[in-house]
Image: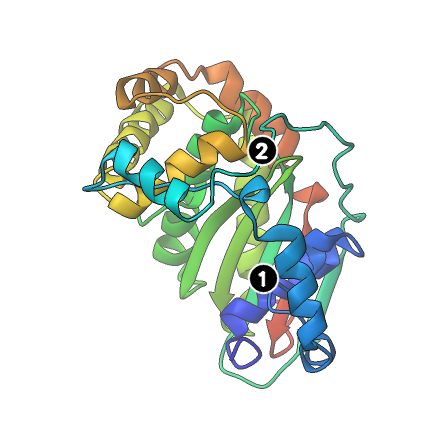
Amino acid sequence: MVEDAPDDLVFELHNAALWGSHPYGYSILGTRDTVSGLEIRDLKELHDRAYHPGQLVVAASGNVEHQALLDVLDQTGWTAEVQRSTTLVDVPPPVPATPTTRHLQREGAQTHVVMGTDGVRHRDPRRLPFLLLSMLLGGGMSSRLFQRVREELGLAYSVFTYQSFYADTGMHGVYVATGPSTAANALDAIRAELAAVAAKGLPEAEIAMGKQQLKGQITLSLESVSARMYRAATVVLYDEPYRSLDELLALVDAITLEQVSDVAREFFDPSRMTVVSLGPEPVAP
């Protein structure tokens, strides 16, 4: 199914180009060869090694009593083992490949393009300024890239930024879906917008507006029971302090103009990004 969905497949192809032989570059689903070669002993070995209390975090939210949950875990043997350490070991982060541009030919009406590179890790104090900048660039219909590439220039059907934060590094970039005749111009427009932000940062009024938008997103996300559950697990998995909603919103308010400018300069320069396109060959303007 992924192979038949170019807007999904292009992200996997970009991961492979960006991270090379590091596991971050692997397809989560595996390949036809690895899936076909799986045997019962492989699954049993994985289950024995990874799926037991010392390796897992149990998180719950919603209409649940904490002690009742602990009682159930006791009754099923989940608290019999020594609990896992939450101390993360610092290891050198993977190094992304030298920026490159690749195109994979495929028939279709659109050319799908991902341009991106490494970012900050989950525990990095710059994560919130990073999120704020990414949101202002491509986080919705009011974002810079949407307004410039789609609304003003009419060069794309869809354009947005994305990001992922891992224990030792992160990644981020821009996705755009466009016609083969407009792909080159769309990429030029995206590069120009990123380069301008990397060089000059963002005006204070725009950052203030973005803070309100980001605080609204954080507040609304906590209305989701599953989001609260994932947040509880994340605190343990990344060995981070639990923060109340008020504390999170205060951290957003504390983001400075200089922090956003520093993140833009270090991570959003288009010259450090790997570009992968999938679909009909982009036509030179």
Residue underneath mark 1: 11
Residue underneath mark 2: 82
Secondary structure beneath dot 2 equals loop
In the rendered structure, which amino acid carries the disc numbered 2? Val
In the image, residue 155 sits, relative to residue 38, either above or below, namely above
Q: Is residue 29 left or right of residue 31?
A: left
Observer-side mark, 1 or 2, equals 2
Q: Residue at x 58, y 56 (%)?
A: 187
Residue 42 in sight from this viewpoint = yes
Q: Quadrant of the C terminus?
A: bottom right
Residue 227 placement (x, y as % from top left): 32, 43
- Place residue 232 in its image quadrant: top left
Residue placed farthest to the bottom in the image?
Answer: 107
In the rendered structure, which amino acid carries the disc numbered 1? Phe
Secondary structure beneath dot 1 equals helix
How many numbered badges does the structure rendering display?
2
In the image, residue 145 sits, relative to residue 85, either above or below, namely below
In the image, residue 3 sits, relative to residue 261, either above or below, namely below
